[in-house]
Each structure stands twice: as structure tokens, then as C-alpha cells.
Image (spheres, helix red, strand yellow):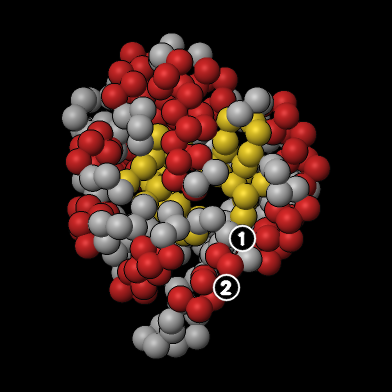
Amino acid sequence: MNWVDIHVHIGKLIYGKPRLTTRDILIKMDELGIEKACLLPIENPEETDYYVPTAQVIAAARRHPDRLIPFCNVDPRRRDPSSFDPLPMIKNYVEKGCRGFGESLSGLWVDDKRLQKIYAVCEELEIPIIVHMDCYRNRDQIGLPRLEKMLQKFPQTVFIAHATHWWSEISAEVLKEDVGGYPQRKIVPDGRVDYLLQTYPNIYGDLSAGSGDNAMTRDKEFAHSFLERNQNKLLFGTDLVYKGQQIPNAEHLRNSGISKEALDKIAFKNTQKLLGL
């Protein structure tokens, strides 16, 4: 058991869904064959019904340091955005053990000046940032031009892209409704995700949630070649958010037919390298 999950949540996040305790997470990890998991706080109001602050994530991870890895979050819109400096807060979280930032869920354009402050801090502190991209959060036009500009402007910042808009761009054919959905059409080769992963060393893809799973299953023939081709730039994840949630991502990755070398990189080696585990 050596898989590393880049994307797990904890606590009460969704109204009407059961709270996810540390014990629940560890049970699910054992069930799926996951050795370590990254705990991501929720401090942006756009995504879920409740908040889970960074302090709670750090406390949970400290009880199981061999299994859980804390990430941190700071909403860039707090206080006076024109003068707010996120560096002291994020640096303090890193000193307390946080190995990354995210997930970023602000309802802003992905190249917003306030988010650029976060990117700059991640660059300075040498921690990756998980960026959730859909039609509401970290918005971009079809083709991801704003994200590409951020990859160019912050070449030392490691971006880990996630969610429906990012994964809809696995295809060269992207419709407006795909940005917030789960397209089932065959994938048209030469999508922007392939281009960005192949062109920029500082961008990775997070295969968690329904969006990541959809990317692996909507066109299995294409997905096989995509996973092999981008084996150095992809990270396994679940996006576990409530007790009892069904997580098919691990099974679909294991059954994708890719080489053992590619599977090991995606399942744990790439994340181990990024986080210095």
C-alpha cells in the first residue's frame, strides 16, 4: 500500500451529507489501498455549505502524521484586498507543517490580481497550489488562455489543476456547457490540457472527483494514451468530502491498462516528488 491521494477533505462540508471524520478517512484510505492523503481546507464560500479552516486540518494531520498531510488555504479577498499580504499567514501555516496550498476555490478569474499574490507566495515558499477550475471558480475562457499566462508569469509556481473546466479541455472540442459539466462525447485529440502538460513544466493534473474520473472514462481508448503520454504530470486523487461517498477513481486508474511504470508515477511517485515525501 503506497498510493498517495492528492485531494481529500475533512469535517462537515455539505448540508444533508454525513460529516467526514479522521477515522472515516483512514478507513476509506485502507479500503482503497492509499498510504497517505493530503487534507485540504475549505476557506472560500463558493464551494461548500460549511467551512473547514486550515487550523482544523493541521490538528487532524498532527494526530496521524504517518498518513495525513496538511495543506493550507487563505481567501485572497479578506480585509482590504488592495493591501492584504498573504505571505505571513501562509508562511506560518508552512512552518506548522503544511506542504501545499489549496484547494483554491475563489469565485474570481484565475488571473485575478488577488490570486496572483497567492501564486507569488507559493513560488517564494516553494509549495504547490491546487486550483479548482469550473464556470464559477478560478474562471477562464475556453482554451485556458488566462491560466497559460499565469504559468508563464510564475514559472517557479507549481500549479495542480482540477475540476470540470480543466478536464473538459482534455478534448480539442469544448462546448460552453462542458466547462461546468461532465461531457460524454468522444475526446477530440490535441486538447489544451495535453498542450499545457506537455509545454509547461509547472502544471500538473489532479485526477480526483467526478471530473477527473470522467476524463479517464468518457473515451477509454484516448484516456489510455493520455495517461501514458502524461505519466509524469498526473496525480491520483479522490476528492472525498462525505462519509459513504463512492470513489471509483482508484479502480478506474488501476484498470486503465497503462504500464506499471505509468501507474506508479500517477498513483504515488509524482506526488511524493512534488511534496518531498
Residue 208 horizontal side relative to residue 188, left or right: right
> Which sits in the foreground, 162 or 126?
126
The amino acid beneath tag 2 is: Asn
The part of the image, by quadrant, that contains residue 121 is: bottom left
Secondary element under disc 1, as helix, strand or loop, is loop
- The answer to whether residue 33 is above or below residue 276 is above
Write the residue at 61% across / 60% down: 97
Give amino acid for label 1.
Gly
Q: In this view, does 152 lie to the left or right of 139?
A: left
Quadrant containing the C terminus in the rendered view = top right
Marked residue nearer the N-terminal end (2 or 1): 2
| Along the line of sight, the residue nearer the viewer: 194 or 33 | 33
Tell me if mark 2 has few (under 14), some (14-19) or many (20+) residues whose alpha carbon lies within 10 angstroms of its own.
few
Q: Are marks 2 and 1 in contact (CB under 8 Å)?
A: no
- Identity of the residue drawn at 72% across and 26% down: 31
Residue at left 65%, top 33%?
35
Residue 127, compared with residue 6, is above or below; it is below
Residue behind mark 2: 92
Which residue in the protein does label 1 denote? Answer: 97
Q: Quadrant of residue 110?
A: bottom left
| Residue 67 pos. (x, y %) | 69, 42
Front position in the image: 185 or 105: 105
Residue 274 at what x, y percent from top left?
Answer: 44, 45
Q: Quadrant of residue 273?
A: top left
**Marks 2 and 1, how far apart in space?**
9 Å
Q: Position of residue 266 (x, y in %)?
A: 45, 29
Q: Residue at x 78, y 40 (%)?
A: 24
Q: What element carries label 2?
A: helix
| Quadrant of the rendering where the N terminus is positioned | top right
From the viewer's perspective, tell me whether residue 226 is left or right of residue 136: left
